[in-house]
Structure formats: structure tokens, C-alpha cells
Amino acid sequence: MPFTPYHFGPAGLIGLVFKRRVDLPVFLLANVAIDIEVLIIYGLGLGWPHHRLCHTFLGGAVVGIAVAAVCFPLRGVFKKVMELFHLAYNTTFLKMLIWSILGVWLHVFIDAMDHWDVKPFWPYGKNPLWSANGGLNDYQIKMVCLICWVAALALLAIHLARHNMQDTRHKTQDPRRKT
Ligand SMILES: [Zn+2]
């Protein structure tokens, strides 16, 4: 996928649907972090194929471990950001590790369906996901990601609206509460 932000759609949707189980910030970050590989190859003008070791399930697992190790000390910051959206945040290193690796793998899975040059099952050199993508072209895969984006934003809006309604109800029920 040429544009990393598309990946936020499916990742955000999965993360919000299973928000009690998923470490959402880490899952989202892992979905983006993997494209540093493409950025470096592009940026340094190395002339290599854009998808290399990080865009494989094996190499991606290593990226996932690195992302979890970097994110773990930042868990306090993540909690504050989640609170802004009234989303509960409880995590452990194991939870971060699992969702970080799954985040990278989701990215590899989507990219492998979109790009023939991704080798998800490296060292196996072929890309069976590309052949099995049901004939979807790049444009259609982007559209699916965009639909996921819209659905994720809708879910977030519903969650925030519900929270506001509960908050208003509490305020009207408890006259001692001033704010
Ligand atoms: Zn990618």
C-alpha cells in the first residue's frame, strides 16, 4: 500500500470492535511502524524493491517485538491519550507484544494482497495472498480500507455519544454534582 494511512482503517475498526481486548495504541502504531522500511528504501534511494524483510510474517514479528519494547515505557502516555476518547486502557507487556505483532501482521496481510512483490511467507519466495485476493485491484483494496476508516470513525462517534449521554444522565440524577 503506497500510503500508510490507509492501514489505519482496518486496524482502527478491529481495534474499536474488540476494544476491551486490543491494545489499541500499540496495534495502530505497529500498523504504521512497519512502513519505515519503505520510507528508508525510498528516502535513501537504494533502488531495492520496496517490500523486503519487514513485510514478511517472520521479519514482521521481529518488528512487532521492537515496537512493543519501544511502546512499553510509553504506556502512561497511551493511557492519557485513550482517556481523551473515554476509552479504558489497561495493558501488560505481553498484551502489547501480542497486539504489536498482530498489528504488523495485519499490515503484511493487506500489503501482500495488494502487492505481488511482498513475500509474506519468506523464506518461501511466492506470494499466495496476492494470487488469492479475489481479483481485487489496488483501487478496490484502498476503497475497502477507506470504508473501514469510515466505519471506525462511526464507531468512535457512537462510543463518544454514548459516553456523553451517560454523563448527562448522571449529572441530572445527582444534583450534588456540579460539573
Ligand atoms: Zn507496507
Image (tube, rainbow, N blue to C red):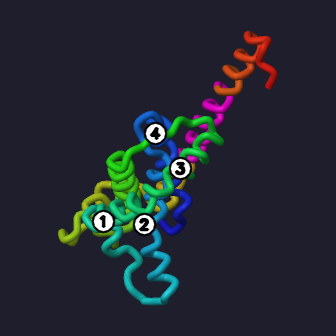
Q: Quadrant of residue 171?
A: top right
Q: Secondary structure at mark 2?
A: loop
Q: CA distance from mark 1 to mark 2?
A: 10 Å
Q: Residue at x 38, y 81 (%)?
A: 49
Residues at marks 1 and 2 touching, judged by CB atoms closer than 8 Å? no
In magenta, the rendered stretch is 147-162
- Residue 89: x, y in percent? 50, 39
Disc 3 packing (10 Å; few <14; some 14–19; many ≥20): few
N-terminal of the two: label 4 or label 3? 3
Say which residue appears at 38% left-offset and 85% top-offset: 48
Q: SS of the residue at dot 4?
A: loop
Nearest to the eye among marks 4 and 2: give it. 4
Chief secondary structure of the magenta span?
Answer: helix
Instruction: Give the residue type at disc 3.
Output: Gly
Disc 4: which residue: 90
Q: CA distance from mark 4 to mark 3?
A: 10 Å
Picture coordinates of residue 2, whole percent (x, y): 51, 69
The answer to which image quadrant residue 168 occupies is top right
Give the SS element for disc 3: helix
Label 2: few (<14), some (14–19) or many (≥20) C-alpha neighbours in 10 Å: many
SS at mark 1 in the image: helix
| Residue kind at label 2, given as amino acid type | Ile
Q: Which mark is residue 108?
A: none
Tags 3 and 1 touching, CB below 8 Å:
no
Would you name the residue on which mark 3 appears?
76
Image-quadrant location for residue 65:
bottom left
Against 89, residue 164 (above or below) is: above
- Residue where numbered disc 1 is placed: 62
Name which of mark 4 and mark 1 comes first in the sequence.
1
Asked if residue 138 is among those painted magenta in the image, a careful observer would answer no
Pick the front one: 152 or 67: 67
To which residue does mark 2 refer?
34
